[in-house]
Amino acid sequence: MTLPMEIDQLLDDEACWRIVLAKDRRFDGAFVLGVHSTGIYCRPSCPARLPKRENVRFYAGNEEAEAAGLRPCLRCRPDSVTREEEAVARAITMLRDAAEPVPLARLAEATGYSPSHFQRLFKRAVGLSPASFARALRMERAEDALSAGDTVTDAIYDSGFGASSRFYEASEGRLGMTPSAWRDGGRGATIRWAIVPTSLGKMLVAATEKGVCRLSFNEGSAELAARFPNAELIEGGERFAGLLAEVMAAIEQPGDSRHIPLDVQGTAFQEAVWRELRRIPPGETRSYAEIAAAIGKPGAVRAAGSANGANNVAVLIPCHRVIRSDGSLGGYAYGEDIKRELLRREGSHTKL
Ligand SMILES: [Zn+2]
């Protein structure tokens, strides 16, 4: 799926240039600037002399800049990790390796920051507080243990949850999203799929045993196979019929569809964005800037847009509820007509 057009419109070139003029460190990581006269790219806060505006182009990240033939700047080192990034990486390792919950104070001490400062910088980098991140890790471990055949109780205790009720509270907090056990193009997963006619056009629905893993419009089985090249794909089937009916109802009579289980895979940041999208009630909309702020990463407007674009499950992860800050529609992976119609059905008041 290509990224929706609206990312660039939300943190547009003019806004990026203003940030560069201000050398605003808060936006380091949100984008880089390419200086095409010298062939390098920089963090927004680069201390080197300001390039001429006409030689500058903005990129969402290092990969994009390098794909455009640019090299990282030796002054601001956009390709190297900062002390803050190092601290976050260190904390993530501690959380991953720990058998028991690690208090914030210990993370802060180990990384040389005050607890409140560390809490902020971790959340800015990861999109979750250290405590939420640790909870997500424990969830993942519990699920891995379950799929390896442990009993529920063993899995819960082994993964560091003190009481099973907390496991279910934490599950609830994920809003029905299961971090998928599959990796590597769906290796080891069985995916059932169907293409059904809807009032919005042909809809592809695909699901693993855990939940819906792909929902898209005007796509065929070839695209599904390209997305999950190593999964076993099975068309239709009785086990799939109930879920399919629920999904179709959610399309035709939109409302709160959060009871429909999803099976998605993303980075911690992407999953934070997707969870936030699922929190937008039907009939309401948000801007990318609001989504980025809601997950504690106000500088990551473009990255939030990219995460939105990487959404595999249209409608059920309601990326259509994100519109431009001026209230106009913005883009949509399956065309603005479908986005407009979905919002109209939900009763959103936008400049349609
Ligand atoms: Zn630089």
Image (spheres, rainbow, N blue to C red):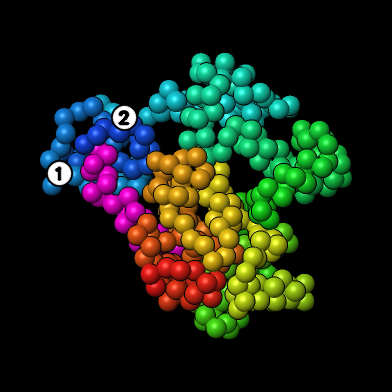
Name the residue rendered at 52%, 72% in the picture.
Answer: 347
Name the residue rendered at 52%, 80% in the picture.
Answer: 200
Q: Are marks 1 and 2 in contact (CB under 8 Å)?
A: no
Please name the amino acid that badge 1 sits on. Answer: Arg
Foreground label between 1 and 2: 1
Q: Quadrant of the N terminus?
A: bottom left
Mark 1 surroundings within 10 Å by alpha-carbon count, few (fewer than 14), some (14 through 19), many (20 or more): few
225 within the magenta span: no
Name the residue rendered at 39%, 67% in the picture.
Answer: 329
Please name the amino acid that badge 2 sits on. Answer: Arg
Which residue is disc 1 drawn over?
53
Q: Position of residue 341 (x, y in %)?
A: 48, 76
Mark 2 surroundings within 10 Å by alpha-carbon count, few (fewer than 14), some (14 through 19), many (20 or more): some
SS under mark 2: loop
Which residue is disc 2 drawn over?
77
Q: Earlier in the sequence, mark 1 or mark 2?
A: 1
